[in-house]
Image (cartoon, coloured by chain):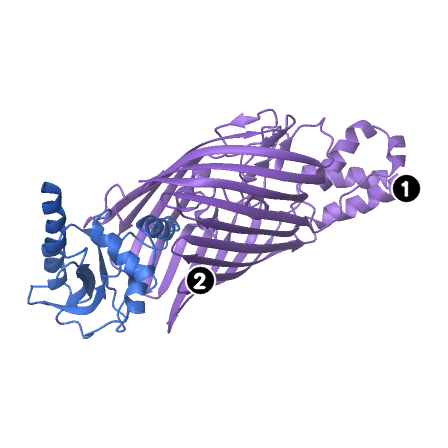
Amino acid sequence: MLKVFGILSTLIFSGVSWGDIYVVTNINNPHDSLSKQEVRDFYLGRRRSFAEGNFTAIYDRKADSELRAKFFRALTGMQLRQVDAFWARLVFAGRMLPLKEVENNSTLEELIANEVNSIGYMSSKPTHDQLKTLMIISTRSE
Amino acid sequence: MGWPIFAADSKWELSGYTTLGYSYESEESLGLFRDSSQRKRFDKDGSFLPDSQIGIQASYQFSSKLRATTQLVYADKADLTFDSSLEWAFLAYQPRPDLDVRLGRLSVDMFRISDVRRLDFASTWMRPPLEVYGWIIPYSIDGFDIAKEYLVGDNFWRVKLQLGKTSPEIQTPDGSQTIETQFNRFAIFSVVLDRYIWNARLSFARFTTAEIGDNQLGVVQLLNGLANIPSPAGAQAGLFADTLLNSYSTRVSYLQGSLSYQLEDWQFDAEIVDISGDTILMPTGTGASIFAGRQINELTPFLILSHFKPGRASVDLDPSWSQVPNNEVLTPIVLGIFNGPRIDQNTISAGVKWGISQNVALKFQWDNTKIKANGYGLWAYGDQINLQDTTVDVFSLSVSLIF
């Protein structure tokens, strides 16, 4: 019975397993949407700014979180170990610093609310009035 | 990413990598090394030294446009000093997000993964294929580089020019002497294209070899002296003197091309390099490798084929050298100079990588290498060895991690 309850709880309350992932930015960012390729470029170290040319703060999530695993799988087709190996090459080649890691949605919302040139992803629709959604990534088929 | 020791909102970022590896090779008279910058130990069949290493990297972000990065590496080297361990120490300035200028001691960016070839955790193989990477001596270059990135549709282009010089030390094949090499006027130009799951890279590098020193000049003079002997050995000695003299202060060129493909569980890499130059001080020829691996849960079995074809024929001494005074001393010296750096071998490798956790990997690899006569440039060996065709098996086990 407890097992059934656990499974149901996961299905009902986890926005990750069945829900969508929201790619978000500051409400004052001039961009209202991004393509999957553009988001992928941000998170694979190929893009460091929006079109205006200012450096963008790119926020990642907790290294071993399910949200992060779903996000990168849906975005790049890679498993987390492949993603970490990919980023390790960028960092240890001296090209990039690691992305800033954020523990939870509320912290992420605070950070992005205070930085126009920023991007992050979260497991639920942003509730902060200074954030907007750039893209929704469906993980239902994952 | 989870693995830097600390980063968060701090301006400091400290991270590192390490490998503890053990390798055993089956040939009594040969010694394995991971690359030519290591010590040569022909009397050791099993050792932790070729693959074990630790690197610590620290970065300080002065502003969004300026940062300093340094990397200190402890690994087996011909000259293990603080200077040689300080593999990177540079300032990076990014006036724009797509433009990167670095100044100081930089990772040498000759081939596809030459700037991260110590980072075993990020690779599936135990060590980069020796036929492509084993003969590269420098890990770093003192100078500057400038990289420009372009996003054109789905294509990410990175164009980079690196200029500088470096003078790492190497050992003779028997490990008895340490020699300073010189890569002067070192210029590397590379173009990288990332598109979806594809990565392609083309690069061209050129440098000038060292100026001739007193010891080498002495050998040239000795050979020129032998050239006066009216025999085939004399004629050969004259030719050797000219070839050796022309090997210094001469240009060497590298041309490289690679293609990588990674889709979910599958990974393919292919790389080809060509080294050309009128010098006998280093290997010339063509090296190539093909890699295929497939991740199955936490395990990734893989296969590698690699080959090096020498760009020049080996030297055989005319029988009349037996009449040359002190030929028993001269012969190994002459053959060592002309045939020592030469590489002629191919390897089949098979192995498996086990991703124990997100930042720890365990690997096992078996290499079967066929070395052709006078093509032992990727091995340590003593004076007494007969450099004929042979086959060597290498068994390796390692654990690598990033932190």
In the image, residue B344 above or below residue B20: below
Outermost residue on the front side: it is A1
Q: Position of residue B392 (x, y in %)?
A: 63, 34
Q: Are marks 1 and 2 in contact (CB under 8 Å)?
A: no
Chain letter behind tag 1: B
Outermost residue on the right side: it is B230
Judge the density around disc 2: few (<14), some (14-19), many (≥20) Cα neighbours within 10 Å.
some
Kindly state the secondary structure of the residue where label 1 is placed: helix
Judge the density around disc 1: few (<14), some (14-19), many (≥20) Cα neighbours within 10 Å.
some
Q: Position of residue B64 (x, y in %)?
A: 25, 59
Q: Position of residue B95 (x, y in %)?
A: 32, 65
Say whether residue B376 is visible.
no
Chain letter behind tag 2: B
Name the colour assigned to chain A in the rendering: blue
Q: Is residue A91 left or right of residue B244?
A: left
In the image, residue A83 above or below residue B236: below
Q: Is residue B170 left or right of residue A30?
A: right
Q: Is residue B96 left or right of residue B118?
A: left
Q: Which mark is residue B60?
A: none
Kindly state the secondary structure of the residue where label 2 is placed: strand
In the image, residue B288 above or below residue B216: below
Q: Which is nearer the N-term, disc 1 or disc 2?
A: 2
The quadrant in which the C terminus of chain B is found is: top left
What type is the residue that disc 1 sits on?
Answer: Pro
| Residue at horizontal 40 percent and vertical 52 percent from the top | B265
In the image, residue B265 above or below residue B38: below
Q: Nearer the viewer, residue B305 or B215?
A: B305
Name the colour assigned to chain B in the rendering: purple
Q: Which mark is residue B198?
A: 2
Q: Position of residue B159 (x, y in %)?
A: 45, 65
Say whether residue B94 is visible.
yes
Q: Which mark is residue B232?
A: 1
